[in-house]
Image (cartoon, rainbow, N blue to C red):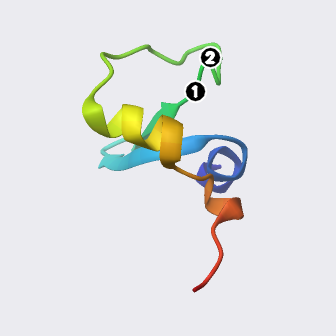
Amino acid sequence: MIDKYMSEYLVGNIKTTKTGAELRIISIEKPTEDAVAVEKNLEDAFLFYFGEKSEEKQDA
């Protein structure tokens, strides 16, 4: 399931929880019905403007 979000959205952080995983998705649109908006931080801004989705990354 995480792979689906990694391929469709810019994921800034993945945190393991007791019930699974919590993803910090950088997106203008709400990725799921139960997604919760959180306060933006400097890392979010950097990733939004300069980051890439994992599928866009290429080996150097």
Q: Are marks 2 and 1 in contact (CB under 8 Å)?
A: yes
Q: Residue at x 64, y 44 (%)?
A: 5
Q: Quadrant of residue 60?
A: bottom right
Tell me, for residue 5, which label it has, or none. Answer: none
Residue at the extreme bottom? 60
In the foreground, 31 or 22:
31
Q: Quadrant of residue 10?
A: top right
* Residue 36: image location, x then y, percent: 45, 15
Tell me, for residue 30, which label it has, or none. Answer: 2
Circle nearer the viewer, 2 or 1: 1
The amino acid beneath tag 1 is: Ser
Horizontally, is 6 left or right of 17 in the view? right
Q: Quadrant of residue 29?
A: top right
* Residue 47: image location, x then y, percent: 45, 43
C-alpha gap between disc 2 and disc 1: 7 Å
Q: Residue at x 62, y 52 (%)?
A: 53
The amino acid beneath tag 2 is: Lys
Quick check: 18 above or below 27? below
* Residue 1: image location, x then y, percent: 65, 49
Q: Secondary structure at mark 2?
A: loop
In the foreground, 26 or 16:
26
Q: Secondary structure at mark 1?
A: loop
Q: Residue at x 63, y 67 (%)?
A: 57
Q: Which residue is mark 1?
A: 27
Quick check: 7 above or below 39? below
* Residue 28: image location, x then y, percent: 60, 19
